[in-house]
Image: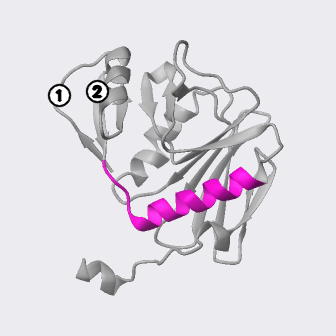
Amino acid sequence: MLVKTKQNFYTPDEYRQLEETTEFRNEYRDGEIVKMTGGTINHSQIIGNIYAFLKSALRGKNARPFMSDLRLWIPRYRRGTYPDVMVVEGELVCTPGRKDEIVNPVLIVEVLSKSTKDFDREDKFRFYRSIPEFREYVLVSQQEFLVQQYIKNESNQWLFQEYEGESATVSFSSIGVQMLMSDIYELVIFETAATEVQE
């Protein structure tokens, strides 16, 4: 979930300095700083499941995963964001002069929240597509066994694939790794209509 801070204009360097000292993470949107609020237990569980699996699956290979504490910078749109999980293949390329901000993921995974799902599917995906190395975008639901995937082919077209149900196997094609849906959702308890009303 994102909450807009006071309407002031910040340069990228001012934003980066703020991120070094602030207690909470913020996104940068071409001059505007947007505070990121905490996620749900399911959100955190799914991120941890995917990261741990990819960390093990990619051990010894020329690719490495990162969790949401590493910032991604998108130069074309002057955006700083913290994807839930991302994978870099080959050399890690950082913003010049920085060691806390990368620019070259091949795979990005976002776990959808009710408040951000439309932004993640539309504008954020458009910003991510400006990254030359970026080849795969995976959106994971918190409410059901559902994973949506966009894969960039050799013709620079984005192809859509959807996985449903606990028995499905998700193929992270950009890095040659498959993951069972049951592993993605391990220890995740879906909210029922009754629990949502109680909350």
**In this rendering, is residue 25 above or below 40?**
above
Which residue shows up at 70% across the image and 78% down it?
167
Picture coordinates of residue 65, whole percent (x, y): 66, 44
What are the residue bounds of the magenta stretch? 37-56
Q: Which amino acid does label 2 sit on?
A: Glu
Residue that mark 1 sits on? 7
Q: From the viewer's side, name the closer residue of 199 and 156.
A: 199
Is residue 99 found inside the magenta-colored segment of the image? no
Task: From the viewer's perspective, tell me whether residue 9 is left or right of residue 28.
Answer: left
Residue 153 visible here: no
User: Helix or strand or loop: what does disc 1 sit on?
Assistant: loop
Which residue shows up at 20% across the image and 35% down it?
5
Which residue shows up at 70% across the image and 41% down it?
64
The image quadrant that residue 6 belongs to is top left
In the rendered image, which quarter contains the C terminus?
bottom left
Residue 98's tag is none
User: Helix or strand or loop: what does disc 2 sit on?
Assistant: strand
Residue that mark 2 sits on? 32
Q: Which amino acid does label 1 sit on?
A: Gln
The image quadrant that residue 32 belongs to is top left
